[in-house]
Image (cartoon, rainbow, N blue to C red):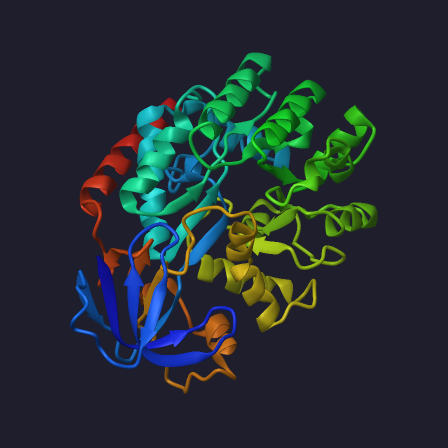
Amino acid sequence: MTLLLKNARFLDWEKLTFTDTHILVEEGVNGKIFFTPRSVPEIEVSEVIDCKGKIVTKSFAVGHHHIYSALATGMPAPAKNPGNFFEILKYIWWTLDKALDKEMIEASALATAIACAKAGATFAVDHHASPNAVEGSLEIIANAFDRIGVGHLLCYEVTDRDGREKAELGLNETEQYLKKRQGLVGLHASFTVGDETMKKAAALVEKFKSGLHIHVAEDRYDQDRTTADYGMKVVERLNAYNMLDHSKTILVHGLHLSDAERKLFRDSKAWMAENMESNLNNGVGVFNSYGLGEKIMLGTDGMHSDMIRSAQQAYFAGQSFEQVDFGGVYNRFRNVHRYLAENKFDGDGENNLVVLDYESRTPVTEQNVLGHFVFGWNSSQVQYVISDGKLIMKDRVIQTVDEAEVMTFAREQAQRLWNRM
């Protein structure tokens, strides 16, 4: 079946040019879109959407997410008030992820996928952790995202922080999942991953022709512990295991890097995911692209699923620390598509679209559209979302599940999670 978007003002996400046209949207993974100056009633269409006065463009994608944090909003204060980044991990996030069970994971994934769709994102790269519910956790997340209609690239966050047995469970979960679906090999961070686990993760990357997804130098603690324990800095250590040789590899954060590490990354095939709001929230520093090159995309680090918001915060906060302009931050916003296309991942084809109901008080032109992107767009303007050619949100209402039912389920699981914590 085919969707028809009538009277569309189409914004090409790469050329930033506008075309007034009707758009035929082919259904299916990696399907196509076709432009026609006239409506074509002889073609069978599943639905017709009048887009007069609206902007149609490629949908968005999240370059780094954590569905496991979806039920954290409003949770009780930790047993101890964290005094540094390591204690934030220990008393908040490592307490939360240990309390997750399969029902909580499902609720987290469903709620996150809905949040992605409502913010215009039809694809998410996720980094998951649930040390006491490892087996089958990635399939639960994948099935939940499939129900909503949001594409995904998942991994399990393997770590030695809970002992070798849990590390082996994480490695096995990764291997079993990669036998069936596209995904990545996940590690928490260098300072929680011993040499044996690192070696086994590198072997999985090679076996499945995949890539690594790992937090890198989010805080100085990662650098200090890695240098003390392994005699080299974080990126140097990853390079020693050939982890930077893969174009599917994603390094996350990258705040506290030496000039030599920045050059290693810039000369590699790997990508970097910036997460400005999370860095500000944790007080670990501010991202600076100095010396890193152009392979930088944006994520949310699980704080939310709104990529417009992430891009705007990257621009506003970045003004004081790096020379980022409208075009630079827009490229980071869109680079996740380039990452997915370069590595031939499914689910982010051209038939993934958003329709923005953007009532601007000033003209929107090809010359100033990036100014509108930074200062005018927001996720509340996302009216329709099309994923793999299917309409998954219509007039801001999710079409694939009963959203109220899912939110009730999520609240129930959140309360269970908080009681466990």
Q: Residue at x 62, y 41 (%)?
A: 249
| Quarter occupied by residue 21 | bottom left
Residue farthest to the top, as pictured = 165
x, y percent for residue 252? 61, 44
Q: Is residue 107 visible?
A: yes
On screen, residue 277 versus residue 262, left or right, reads: left
With respect to residue 331, does 245 lie above or below?
above
Q: Nearer the viewer, residue 220 or 373?
A: 373
On screen, residue 200 versus residue 268, left or right, reads: left
On screen, residue 116 versus residue 391, left or right, reads: right
Q: Is residue 84 visible?
A: no
x, y percent for residue 151? 39, 46
Q: Nearer the viewer, residue 75 or 400?
A: 400
Q: Quadrant of the N terminus?
A: bottom left
x, y percent for residue 182? 46, 37
Residue farthest to the bottom, as pictured = 363
With respect to residue 223, does 368 lie above or below?
below
Q: Residue at x 73, y 34 (%)?
A: 242
Q: Nearer the viewer, residue 209 or 231?
A: 209
x, y percent for residue 327? 59, 71
Q: Residue at x 74, y 52 (%)?
A: 266
| Quarter occupied by residue 138 | top left
On screen, residue 360 versus residue 94, left or right, reads: left
Q: Quadrant of the C terminus?
A: top left
Q: Nearer the viewer, residue 7 or 275?
A: 7
